[in-house]
């Protein structure tokens, strides 16, 4: 089933899930900011230098999903605003419920 507008695309993987993030570094505060297309939009206060924003993204997503930081991994887009992230130990339904998205 293709995602509809406003749906975050969360793909099941053998060990958990993968989802796409749109990251806004250098924001006034760190938060899950909503949905942009099929990506989850997150804002982090950390600057996009030296991996600081990526580390903040991992902390934010781990906290929002109730998993440890070691269960969250950026699998692509390390130097980009659009990132693909893997989360171990969660189902797509659990992730949607914890993030409050459809």
Image (cartoon, rainbow, N blue to C red):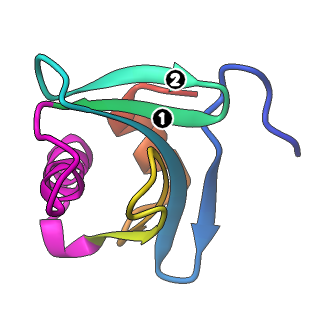
Q: Residue 68's image quarter? A: bottom left
Residue 10 versus residue 97 in the image, above or below? below
Q: Residue 50, image x and y in percent? A: 14, 62
Q: Residue 6, image x and y in percent? A: 66, 20
| Residue 16 in magenta stretch | no
Q: Secondary structure at mark 2?
A: strand
Q: Nearer the viewer, residue 93 or 32?
A: 32
Category of crowding for the residue at label 1, using alpha-carbon neighbours closer than 10 angstroms: few (below 14), some (14–19), many (at least 20): many
Q: Is residue 83 left or right of residue 47?
A: right
Category of crowding for the residue at label 2, using alpha-carbon neighbours closer than 10 angstroms: few (below 14), some (14–19), many (at least 20): some
Residue 101 versus residue 58 in the image, above or below? above
What residue is shown at x 65% (from left), y 34% (from top)?
38
What residue is shown at x 12% (from left), y 16% (from top)?
28
Kindly indicate whether the residue at mark 2 contacts the one at mark 1 (C-beta within 8 angstroms). Answer: yes
| Number of numbered callouts drawn | 2
Instruction: In the rendered structure, find residue 35 and report the number of the disc placed on it.
Output: 2
What residue is shown at x 40% (from left), y 63% (from top)?
90
Position of the N terminus, as image quadrant, is top right
Determine the residue located farthest toward the front in the rendered image: 49
Q: Is residue 89 left or right of residue 12?
A: left
Q: Nearer the viewer, residue 97 or 58?
A: 58
Q: Nearer the viewer, residue 40 or 95?
A: 40
Task: Tell me the CA gap for discs 1 and 2.
Answer: 5 Å
Residue 95 versus residue 91 in the image, above or below? above
Position of the C terminus, as image quadrant, is top right
Q: Which residues are magenta?
A: 45-71
What residue is shown at x 35% (from left), y 72% (from top)?
89
Task: Name the residue that disc number 1 marks.
Answer: 40
Q: Residue 20, image x and y in percent? A: 54, 49
């Amino acid at each position: 089933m293709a995602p509809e507008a406003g749906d975050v695309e969360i793909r099941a993987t053998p060990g958990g899930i993968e989802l796409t993030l749109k990251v806004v570094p250098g924001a006034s505060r760190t938060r899950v900011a909503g949905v942009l297309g099929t990506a989850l939009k997150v804002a982090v206060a950390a600057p996009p230098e030296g991996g600081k924003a990526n580390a903040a993204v991992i902390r934010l997503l781990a906290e929002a999903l109730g998993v440890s930081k070691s269960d969250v991994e950026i699998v692509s887009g390390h130097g980009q605003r659009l990132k693909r992230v893997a989360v171990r130990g969660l189902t797509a339904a659990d992730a949607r419920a914890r993030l409050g998205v459809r």
